[in-house]
């Protein structure tokens, strides 16, 4: 494996910016100092004028393999992630077939081992009748990121709406339980009422159907289960101002038993954007009115919201062009999440130190990931160089998702990802991939 030294860069890590050099050897960060001399034995990268940040860790993606590979594969989406500065991902169980058994879970790890350029982990799925398989995951808590529960509308039989099953999951799982929280009964009632009133529905109806109340009631219920059993609960993609009263910033993240995630699209878009983008921003939970976005930003910055993710969910262009009720819900975002947040750094909405905390440090802490998420000597060398003065515009020709489109097409980012190292391997540098090395299965300190 090559040895690298990144020279004269601004290192962003643990709330500070420092000037210096970083030596990468044998897949690890060997030395961080104001100046490092390797006597010509290392490949040198000049990082002057750039920021070196820990690679982003995305705790919620849908890479569609197996069974839905016309939309995406682990290879294609991990490759897109790497180009965007995301060095690790945690992928969801709603593939075909859904991941309801240990055998199916390990099958996905095998696919990733052979094809993923990024580091990886996979959630165990839940249904109303697979508790025995779920509890077997307790024996793998150092090798599996968590258990996923759809406590709201989903596809197939992934919706868990049996209170006895929820009791068993929350009382029995020793892993982090990640939940999608939307109340199915409220959604169905809203849909029925709106159809009776309007007849034909349109994309702008989405946040009316999947409204604030549907999110709040489901999140509140999940928290009740977690408090009853002292479970480790992580609520995904918070999208409403109302839900924020359920979370606290009064205790350190390391001591929280209940944590929350916000996604980049809920920080960027509002319901006003349906007029322009239509089904391209149809997702669950819905993008809502602008006061929710502002409340999410406030909660992110004051630490009621713990991590930033994407919920990357690619569909084909044809699937998004159907009428509102049949158009598939989800947005492809993992290639552009770091650049989108750097846009807000440039705008002064968030500091780069806070961005790194929410996309790298806090994700590693939340999931107890071993030796990743920080720029520390001895840690895996998952690091990214970003140039804040190299603009790039999202266009068809530079989109790497298999689906080939993005809701951000035409958006001009002020910054670019120039280099991505994963486990010490320069997998992406100035637009060129080196695919000679695959990512690793993440491990957890539990």
Image: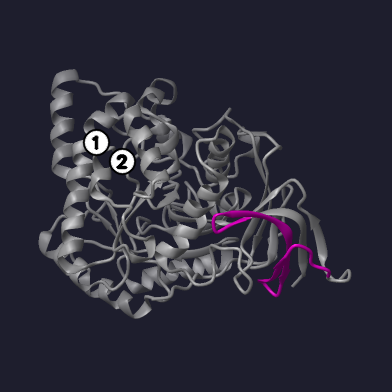
Q: Looking at the image, can residue 329 be seen?
A: no
Which quadrant holds residue 413? top right
What range is drawn magenta here? 12-37
Query: Which residue, given by chain and number where applicable, does mark 2 sit on?
Result: 285
Q: Is residue 280 above or below residue 158?
A: above
Q: Looking at the image, can residue 100 be seen?
A: yes
Q: In front: 323, or 174? A: 174
Disc with the residue nearer the chain's start (1 vs 2): 1
Which quadrant holds residue 265? top left
Q: Residue sitting at 73 percent across and 59 percent down?
A: 20
Q: Residue sitting at 36 percent across and 49 percent down?
A: 305
Which quadrant holds residue 270? top left
Tell me residue 174's x, y (percent). 28, 73
Q: In the rendered structure, find residue 210 and report the number of the disc placed on it.
A: 1
Q: Is residue 46 above or below residue 182?
A: below
Q: Is residue 50 above or below residue 31?
A: above
**Left of 440 or right of it: where is 391?**
right
Instruction: Tell me the colour scheme of the image.
Output: one colour
Q: Give the secondary structure at mark 1.
A: loop
């Amino acid at each position: 494996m090559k040895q690298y030294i990144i020279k004269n860069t601004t290192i962003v890590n643990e709330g500070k910016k420092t000037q210096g050099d970083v030596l990468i050897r044998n897949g690890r960060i060997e030395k961080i100092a104001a100046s490092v001399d390797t006597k010509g034995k290392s490949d040198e990268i000049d990082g002057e004028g750039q920021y070196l940040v820990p690679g982003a860790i995305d705790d919620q993606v849908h890479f569609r393999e197996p069974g839905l590979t016309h939309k995406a594969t682990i290879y294609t989406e991990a490759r897109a992630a790497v180009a965007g500065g995301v060095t690790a991902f945690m992928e969801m169980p709603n593939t075909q077939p859904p991941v309801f058994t240990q055998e199916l879970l390990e099958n996905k790890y095998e696919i990733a081992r052979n094809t993923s350029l990024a580091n990886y982990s996979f959630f165990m799925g839940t249904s109303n009748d697979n508790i025995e398989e779920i509890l077997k995951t307790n024996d793998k808590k150092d090798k599996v990121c968590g258990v996923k529960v759809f406590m709201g509308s989903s596809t197939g039989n992934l919706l868990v709406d049996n209170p006895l099953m929820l009791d068993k999951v929350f009382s029995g799982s020793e892993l982090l339980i990640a939940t999608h929280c939307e109340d199915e009964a409220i959604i169905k009632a809203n849909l029925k009422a709106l159809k009776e009133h309007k007849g034909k529905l349109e994309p702008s109806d989405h946040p009316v159907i999947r409204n604030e109340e549907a999110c709040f009631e489901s999140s509140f219920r999940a928290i009740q289960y977690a408090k009853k059993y002292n479970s480790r609960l992580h609520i995904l993609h918070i999208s409403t101002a109302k839900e924020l009263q359920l979370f606290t910033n009064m205790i350190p993240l390391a001591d929280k038993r209940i944590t929350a995630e916000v996604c980049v699209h809920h920080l960027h878009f509002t319901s006003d954007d349906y007029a322009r983008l239509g089904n391209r921003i149809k997702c669950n939970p819905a993008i809502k009115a602008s006061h929710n976005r502002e409340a999410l930003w406030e909660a992110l910055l004051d630490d009621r919201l713990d991590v930033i993710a994407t919920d990357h969910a690619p569909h084909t262009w044809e699937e998004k062009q159907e009428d509102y009720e049949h158009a598939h819900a989800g947005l492809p975002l993992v290639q552009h999440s770091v650049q989108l947040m750097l846009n807000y750094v440039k705008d002064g909405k968030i500091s780069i130190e806070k961005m790194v905390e929410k996309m790298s440090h806090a994700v590693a802490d939340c999931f107890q990931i071993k030796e990743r998420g920080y720029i520390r000597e001895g840690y895996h060398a998952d690091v990214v160089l970003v140039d804040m003065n190299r603009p790039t515009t999202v266009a068809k020709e530079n989109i790497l998702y298999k689906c080939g489109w993005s809701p951000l097409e035409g958006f001009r980012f002020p910054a670019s990802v120039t280099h991505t190292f994963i486990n010490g391997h320069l997998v992406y540098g100035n637009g060129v991939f080196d695919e000679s090395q695959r990512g690793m299965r993440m491990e957890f300190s539990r």
